[in-house]
Amino acid sequence: MSVYDVLQTIVPTTIFFAAPLIFTALGGVFSERSGVVNIGLEGLMTIGAFVGIVFNLTFADRFGEWTPWLALLAAMVVGAVFSLLHAVASVTFRADQVVSGVAINFLALGLSLFLVKKMYGKGQTDQIQVGFDKIDVPVLSDIPVIGPLLFSNAYAPSYIAIALAFVSWYVIYKTPFGLRLRAVGEHPMAADTMGIHVAKMRYIAVMISGALGGLGGAVYATIISRDFSHATISGHGFMALAAMIFGKWHPIGAMGAALFFGLAQSLSIVGQTIPFLKNVPTVYLLIAPYALTILALAGFIGRAEAPKAAGTPYIKGKR
Amino acid sequence: MEYVIEMLNIRKVFGTFVANDNITLQVKKGEIHALLGENGAGKSTLMNVLFGLYQPDGGEIRVKGKPVRITDPNVANDLGIGMVHQHFMLVDTFTVTENIILGSEPTRAGTIDMKRAEREVRELSERYGLAVDPTAKIADISVGMQQRVEILKTLYRGADILIFDEPTAVLTPQEIRELMQIMRTLVREGKSIILITHKLKEIMEVCDRVTVIRRGKGIATLNVAETNPNELAALMVGREVQFTTAKKPAEPGKPVLEIKDLVVKDARGIKAVNGLNLTVHAGEIVGIAGVDGNGQTELIEAITGLIKAESGTIRLNGRDITNLPPRKIIEAGVGHIPQDRHKHGLVLDFPIGENMVLQTYYQPPYSKRGLLNFQAIYEKARQLIREFDVRTPDEYTKARALSGGNQQKAIIGREVDRDPDLLIAAQPTRGLDVGAIEFIHKRLIEQRDRGKAVLLVSFELDEVMNVSDRIAVIYEGNIVAIVDPKETTEQELGLLMAGSKRKEAGVS
Amino acid sequence: ACGGQGGNNAGGGKDTFSVAMVTDVGGIDDKSFNQSAWEGLQKFGKDNGLEKGRGGYDYLQSSSDADYATNLNKLVRSDFDLIFGIGYLMGDAVKEVAKQNPKKHFAIVDTVVDEPNVASITFKEHEGSFLVGVVAGLMTKTNKIGFVGGMEIPLIEKFESGFRAGVKAVNPKATVEVQYAGAFDQADKGKAIASSMYASGIDIIYHAAGATGSGVFSEAKDLKKKDPNREIWVIGVDKDQAPEGEVKVGGKTYNVTLTSMVKRVDVAVYDTAKRAKEGDFPGGKTIEYGLPENGVGIAPTQDNIPENVLKTVDEWKQKIIKGEVKVPTNRKEYEQFAATIK
Amino acid sequence: MKSNRLQQFLIPLLAVLLGMIAGSIVMLASGYNPIAGFGALVYGAFGDTYYIGETIRQTTPYILTGLAVAFAFRTGLFNIGVEGQLIVGWLAAVWVGVSFDLPKIIHLPLALLAAALAGALWGLIPGVLKAYLKVHEVIITIMMNYIALHVTNAIIRSVLSDEGFKSKPVKESASLHSDFFDAITHHSTMHYGIFIAVAAAFVMWFLLERTTKGFELRAVGFNQHASQYAGMNVRANIILAMVISGAFAGVAGAMEGLGTFGNISTKAGFTGLGFDGIAVALIGGNNAFGILLSALLFGALKVGALEMPSSAGVPTELVDIIIALIIFFVASSYMIRWLLSRWQKGAE
Ligand SMILES: Nc1ncnc2c1ncn2[C@@H]1O[C@H](COP(=O)(O)OP(=O)(O)OP(=O)(O)O)[C@@H](O)[C@H]1O
Ligand SMILES: Nc1ncnc2c1ncn2[C@@H]1O[C@H](COP(=O)(O)OP(=O)(O)OP(=O)(O)O)[C@@H](O)[C@H]1O
Ligand SMILES: [Mg+2]
Ligand SMILES: [Mg+2]
């Protein structure tokens, strides 16, 4: 294979790997920027995957080609509602946010499998029939060299993920909402004295993370697994969490980190086909993505500062 | 008489503790009204009630004659009440402008109109003479400028009743003078001000009237023109207070701390201490006077081993301790009352008793064969709590629950008790009331009289002049002058601190 | 949904034969061997007028490896006459529990447990894989074929080696690219591997990777949908995976499943239960299900395979049955096998 | 407050109760009989000696993973890597267990030590990166989990077996198997590991609360600046904390390798014991005694759940829902405290 051929497999793989992680990591950014630690991302993805598939299976006949899109929407809504539990526990009831996040993970898996068994009488759903198509972006895919790399054989949600990273950046850094969000996460009392409703902001942020986590899970299930079972989301939420921290709680950084994970994964896969790596035992390629991440963090990314108030419930009048 | 603010019989209870017990405070339009009281008297609580952060459990609030219910800071803002908090309410990672506009951002098409915001901030700051850089990050600016940002925040919202909660505790003398000027300007512009401070001089200087509270109860409201500091102090503490601590002349002995050509870089890699030389002898208190940010912090942290010195030497009793690990330096005989008691001084979530052995827990009798001896630890704690009058329910109470003054007393007790040859005291009385200050000053002098060397760093010229035997003026990382407190004036010190040269008095 | 006949069918004088199985974490609807085993058991139950539950036929699902012994024991204590452990991972647990309960009958699928009261059921996956290898070897247009394995374990190596031998036997020019995903539950890796394989010109992928294989199907279907004329195939595993391969493009239905290598766990389970009921329990024996027993083979759905290919497949099948060809079960044997071809 | 002590016990208890009530509502709403469901759950966990044995067996690793997570928490670190540390501990224990012929008195401790060391090594890496480069331990430990999984599988395949999927059984001299427990619990898989786990809980309590080193570790966990100021070596303590946490996790792996399974096979995925350990630690209030109880609760729920489908027709997933609800209620103890105070006021 020529280098270009290699790139042509690596780049699209990188992007589709990364897309669900990007959505979810962005959700994490919103939540943690508001001061609510969210290790429930795994559970939010699980719920999203579940809703995405169930909606698709239920309504495919009615909505036809629109089904997967509506399924994503449904996953976002349910994800947001589900994340309310985390918000209520950690904002209103001042629960330890890590504990509440762990509970979200347990609940999501238990509840979705329970419902699958209830609804279908078995432990996993059927395969969906209507998914997202691989598309060539008109015009852009005709650009020489980068067109085929970046704009063909890809899925629309992948582009949405990347676009959303920029939208999130804009929202967080350029709008009043974003300014208030960050203020609440850095110094909730200061925000409070400026008349910003801390609890409300945190609720909104957690629900955004629910919506985006749900979206990430649904995108994963719709494009990749096409059904839902106990194994559909296995560790992806934690990878998204890692991407968020790796990206220093910044939307573009989180996207970059997710893409890096995708790249590392696809390198390890393509690596198996590269002649001089062929004789390397498989295990090295399997651990390569994770080892690369550690090296990257240790080597040049360095330390990251979490939002100052992340993890602490805000209690009015407490110093 | 027209009152802009009337707080009538305000009552505020935390659990079973009555923080405000039927306090009445009436503020006239256009006056600067001081609120005076010991640490924990309930001043901040009362103001937080006025600002809508706390809901009162009883009493009535009237603004401009109208009864109001201030349910949250938004309501206060709408009523024209603004507050500069005791602990700054600024987001470190934001710019000056972002902090000011937070919550009422000017927008264009949904986006923050940062250009316009910066312009407005600049205009406002010019109008009231509050010099700030609208684009600077809070983390990068001086405490004085941070305070001006706090003031601008209230003005930006159109406040005409301003509450200042201990604004001067963290300021340098120059900054304090500037602030006084600003307050006078504000009053001229028709604003009314409530000022909380422990510094009686300031009250005498700018205030029109003063309300004194003690242990949550209102004691008196006086016209400043008709009272004096002694009366105020007595009202506030309930007994006579001495402002200048009596002390014998110093009897300096051998050099204890000798610093030669010390260079220390700050976090940003700039030389904050730049070839500094200083000697402190046994039996003397050397005060370091200087404007914040001239290398005081780095100097102390280098002596105590918290940051590395680039070059130069630090000797203790003749022994080189430069860049030793903190523990070695502590063991060599250095005690340190840190500037930031919450960050460095205490493990807030440990019982106060365990905080008393924070440096010595591994030594006998507190530790035996790797095991803690709680009996010995708490015995020591009880002794210190008694000796240093630390007010705490018991020695098992978390340090977090103690008031600032009592936390400070605990730290001082701990450091003094280790009997170090050199005691470094950084801002030891910041934010404390006159009673507590008196206590702490006595302890420092006591150490001196026992033949110890004391290095005092303070932004309070009063304190430096009262307590020190020699004053070293620090400017841009260097000691630029050493003066005798009995032979100098605040004016002269102020000039030196601002960098103007002085020929005499050999720089050691 | 409340289990109709609660729990008090306690042992006692039984007149019916009861049988149960323990699944691994996949559960009875994993579209793979657990499901197949349960189908066999259900059929047995139906044919013998048994009811689901204690005293009839039943299953327990494990939620982790640690549950195997617990679940087997539970079934022992519920007094089932024959108890199946499904999957090679359960070998140790079956051995342990069988030793503790020498009067009970057990059966283990996919591995061998050497105890007098355990019947071991294994499959000659390599033989079935050989046949689908023949299909792939004959049908590839690019002479590039892929194999995606779940984890690199001896069981999956049987699939790999048999498959490669099959390809080699009919098309020595074709290369088989082998990749292991390292897991049976990572559809994203399956998809990525498939994507990379199809992009490199591979046109047929045989997967033995459980849920990781869903990713292979997903990629193949997406490619097919984009370009219905492209010849792109997946060979399924364990069950007839034709339903997984269906893809609709503009009203027309295609199927990317070329065929599947089926492993008739259901048949084996049914047979063993039947023999036990009839007093012919093959305790202490290992029963190997290969081509002659119809224990492995190519799936009934063969619409995408031309007649002549099927004929060749059948020829090879006969050769294997007759013992003329010995299908390799691991890489070493494959190397020897390959050496005889050129 | 006088009732503080009482509340400390009351709150988790109420949380469990509320979780059960909520679980009943879920069961009712989805058409199951909660009495039958919980009956099966309790029977499956404590119904007779066999079930009790299984529950204790399941509790054993939970205690240790709970301790591992809690130890890190107490020292200001979030160790999501317990899972990986457990896996390498399991591997090391089995490796030693199959490789030597030694008297039991040496062999068994040696295997346990190997597990602890392996877990410690897996904790050392994130510890060092955190201490020296300030890299967030959460990411590193997540990555280390995957590395542990794949590396362990490769070693089992290539070193501990002949291209196979599992190791030989550990020698009798390194086994935790107990004929005595086997006999009294009707062949449950309960083994001597429970003693080690309970001892480990004591060790953690003793180490943190009674030793000088524990004082340092806790101080660094609460306030690194003050600890450094007081002369403690912050970096060394961070590393030590991760190492000890990892060692607990490694020993948890030994429980599986030398006890429950007696060998190691390649893993298709994580065991879940490490992740569950987070919940165990948190429900147990990160304190050694609390963890013993919460591990028992977890063990009972997990083992009892296996009985639910067959005798009450309730899917096992319901137990995950109940566990999640219990965690929520424990986490929201503020709410319970508030309810309690309302109730107390009402009673007065
Ligand atoms: N969350 C809380 N719970 C109980 N008591 C509290 C709490 N927060 C503060 N306190 C009480 O507040 C008091 C501290 O108040 P005080 O205003 O006297 O301290 P301070 O001198 O202002 O401290 P600082 O110097 O840090 O500003 C303590 O007596 C403590 O009991
Ligand atoms: N959040 C709180 N919870 C419980 N008690 C509190 C709280 N805040 C303050 N208190 C109590 O109210 C008292 C008054 O506190 P306040 O902060 O008003 O004192 P202050 O007069 O501002 O003291 P300082 O001069 O140190 O700033 C404290 O001593 C403390 O006991
Ligand atoms: Mg105050
Ligand atoms: Mg104060």
Image (cartoon, coloured by chain):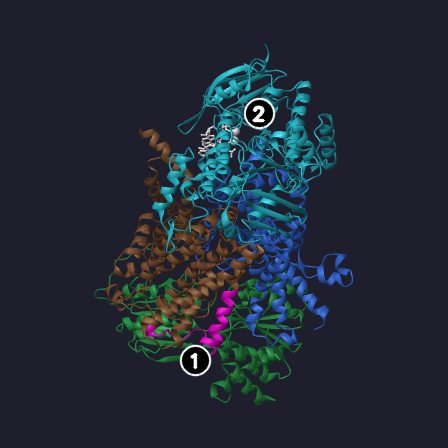
Query: Which chain is assigned brown?
Result: D
Residue A247: where, in percent of width, then height?
Answer: 62, 53
| Colour for chain B in the figure | cyan
Say which residue appears at 71% left-offset and 33% top-offset: B117
Task: Give the amino acid at mark 2.
Answer: Val
| Image-quadrant location for residue B250 | top right
Which is more toward the observer, A182 or B349? B349
- Identify the residue at the far left of this view: C13
Q: Are marks 2 and 1 on the same chain?
A: no
Asked if residue A148 is positioned above or below residue B32 in the image, the reply reads below
Asked if residue D101 is positioned above or below residue D114 in the image, the reply reads below
Left/right placement of residue B368 relative to residue B114 reads left
Left/right placement of residue B476 relative to residue C206 reads right
Which residue lies under the disc numbered 2? B75
Q: Is residue D163 magenta?
A: yes
The chain under label 1 reads C
What's the magenta region?
A: D147-173
Q: Is residue D262 magenta?
A: no
Which residue lies under the disc numbered 1? C293
Q: How many marks?
A: 2
Residue B488: where, in percent of width, then height?
Answer: 64, 30
| Colour for chain C in the figure | green
Left/right placement of residue C5 relative to residue B88 reads left
Helix, strand or loop under label 1: loop
Helix, strand or loop under label 2: helix
Which is more toward the observer, B32 or C193? B32
The chain under label 2 reads B
- Tell me, yes or no, if residue B71 can be seen here: yes
